[in-house]
Amino acid sequence: MIGCAGALLLSCSKQEPTLPDNGRVSLSAAVGKMDTRVSDGAVVDGTYYLTYYATPDRQAVCMVPFANSAGYPLVTNTTGIYQFLKWRDISLPATGSSYLFTLDNIANETETTSLPLGEDYRAAALNASPEVDIVWGRKTVAAGAENNSVDFTLSHRMSKISLEISVNSSNIVLADKNVKISFINVVDQPATFNRSSGAVSVGSNAMTEVVLHEGKLIQDGSKYILPSSWIFPPQTFKTDNWPKLRIELDGTVYEGPLNHYMINVDEDADTPVAMTGLNAGRHLTLRASLSETAGDVELIFMPVWIKKWEEIDNIGITAKQCGVYAESDYLQLVEAYNQDPKDEKALQKFGTLDLSTNRWTFILYKNIGDATGAAGMPKFKDGDFEMSFNGYTVYGYNTKDDLVN
């Protein structure tokens, strides 16, 4: 089966067989890093979103499927058919002499400036929800220097957190023990993303307690670490309500506020600087030590380590593939499919269309609901589609026939 990006590229190539000479726009993108080649962090595949000037006073957004490290922006014509974006379709801004582009991985083709970020971007473990990672880049191309490649350097717009725990007492044993670790007094959900600046804001969203882990930790030499780093929205900490870390072990609670200083390991590691919050594009390692002093349990914090979030072995550039990730996605999918005619623009978020058979294939990337919601689940009006379950279920069902009226 052809993937989402591949299907769109193939469908467009059938319409325009002389692509190399027709002025289409093509992109490449990579995560930025000072001391490595750009190609080390290249975007290979996935669907991204390009913002450009359609007229001197109006911006537009279009999807960019990447395949084999190349991205080709796609726009719809008046009949709703996808075509490649051409340089002749792009305008210079009214106030500038260079073409201006931004590229990100937020699945939205309507908003050109501020996008609301909902539950899908709530703080999460990187290994469980890599799509929470937001990446963004800006590129200008001088008028008269148009070519077939616009090369982006992307940066992470969220913040990454890791945790290291050490033990300074023979009476405290972490090995093979179940622990509960919570991060307290933090904002876990961003409010908006600005396509023009790449800024993620938390707005007035409330602070909360986030459970980072329940279960056994991973032993790394003399330290213990979480099974996965976490992604949080960037934010400024409140001095009167400073974040705390809580570790529950063997019925004992170890809790304390984070250190107010951090060490930038990319620069002078001997010079601590004030810690003010979680910064976009930065990887913070929280370091804590469990100890016992005169019978009092203590959680001692060392200065936070901070560095650029650009590790080559964990690039973290993630674009949401077309598919169903949440119950809200499934509800939108059924509604769009059951319309007459089908809402094909909406369906493109959830699967691929085989142009030879005019048949959709929808793809699951997470379990949707559970058996308790099966009685009220919405169903498809017919079975003229395919469903790739990928081992997941919809309200406990794992066959297409159970999803059809």
Image (cartoon, helix red, strand yellow):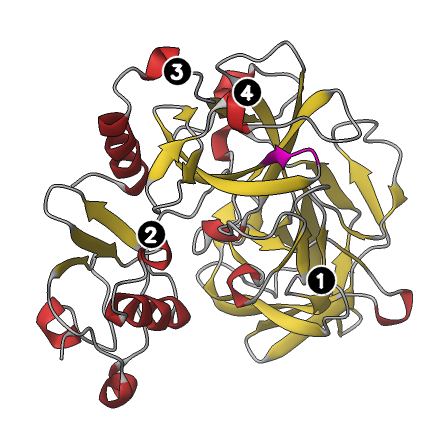
**Magenta extent:** 52-56
Location of mark 3 (residue)? 22
Q: CA distance from mark 1 to mark 2?
A: 54 Å
**Residue placed at 58% from the left, 25% from the top?**
152
Circle 3: is it few (<14), some (14-19), or many (20+) Cα within 10 Å? few
User: Can you see residue 399?
Assistant: no
Q: Amino acid at mark 4?
A: Val
- In the rendering, which numbered label is found on residue 150? 4
Give the mark nearer the N terminus: 3 vs 2. 3
- The image quadrant that residue 300 belongs to is bottom right
The amino acid type found where label 2 is placed reads Gln
Q: Are marks 2 and 4 in contact (CB under 8 Å)?
A: no
Give the residue pinned by disc 2. 348
Is 163 placed above or below 402 here?
above
Q: Secondary structure at mark 3?
A: loop
Location of residue 34 with respect to 206 vertically, above or below? above
Mark 1 Cα shell of 10 Å, populated few (<14), some (14-19), many (≥20): some
Tell whether 374 sits left or right of 111.
Answer: left
Which of marks 4 and 3 precedes in the sequence? 3
